[in-house]
Image (cartoon, rainbow, N blue to C red):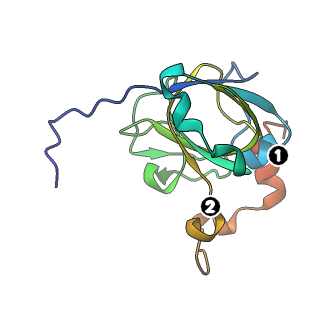
Amino acid sequence: MTNRSEPIAYRPIGVVRSLHTDPAKCPIQPRYARGIEGRIEIDPAFEAELDDLEGFSHIVLLFHFHRAKPHRLKVVPFVDDASRGVFSTRAPSRPNPIGMSVVRLVRREGCVLHIADVDVLDRTPLLDIKPHIERFDVDGPVRSGWQEAVDEADAERRGRRLPG
């Protein structure tokens, strides 16, 4: 195990730009943000690292939850009414507020990536980009824990932040 007292520092590679400015109104998960467009502005120092990314339909964004509330051991997820251990959710209130989102890559223009299905707040610091590769990312049957009992219509309503 690593020494927990040793800090780890990351430098953002860019920023996510979106129409989402209010966390309470931001769609939750890309599935519930279909069609919502945004862009990623990459630091020009990293432009060469974007080469060959255009061949991928989806990219994985790893980002800093810059507006997250303090870490909590248990949270009530958006699709449920029960308190759950934070590691069994994708809630932003984590020991290390790192978020992940799989978005559609629409096109690249130099250091700007145009994306769709954006569920990320405007001005979110971007830590990394990885290509989504279907044959590597999931193999075989998938179990979704407590999520398997969640009603899809209710999840869709809550994920899109629609009234009850």
* Picture layout, residue 160 above or below residue 47: below
Please give the name of the residue rendered at 49% of the width and 57% of the height, measured from the top-left corner. Answer: 88
Category of crowding for the residue at label 1, using alpha-carbon neighbours closer than 10 angstroms: few (below 14), some (14–19), many (at least 20): some
* Picture layout, residue 107 above or below residue 130: above
Front tag of 1 and 2: 2
Please give the name of the residue rendered at 26% of the width and 34% of the height, measured from the top-left corner. Answer: 8
Quadrant in which the C terminus appears: top right
Q: Relative to 81, is 44 on the left or the right? A: left
Task: State the image coordinates of residue 38 (x, y, percent, origin top left).
Answer: 75, 28
Q: Which residue is mark 2?
A: 133
* Picture layout, residue 20 above or below residue 28: above
Q: Relative to 131, is 115 on the left or the right? A: right
Task: State the image coordinates of residue 156 (x, y, percent, origin top left).
Answer: 81, 50
Q: Is residue 68 visible?
A: no
Q: Relative to 110, is 160 on the left or the right? A: right
Please give the name of the residue rendered at 58% of the width and 37% of the height, measured from the top-left corner. Answer: 50
Q: Rounded to the nearest whole Å, what is the CA distance between mark 1 and mark 2?
A: 29 Å
Q: Relative to 68, is 56 on the left or the right? A: right
Task: State the image coordinates of residue 115 (x, y, percent, origin top left).
Answer: 74, 36
Category of crowding for the residue at label 2, using alpha-carbon neighbours closer than 10 angstroms: few (below 14), some (14–19), many (at least 20): few
Q: Secondary structure at mark 1?
A: helix
Please give the name of the residue rendered at 21% of the width and 32% of the height, measured from the top-left corner. Answer: 7
Q: Secondary structure at mark 2?
A: loop
Amino acid identity at mark 1: Arg
Q: Which residue is mark 1?
A: 157
Question: Which quadrant of the view contains residue 121?
Answer: top right
Amino acid identity at mark 2: Ile
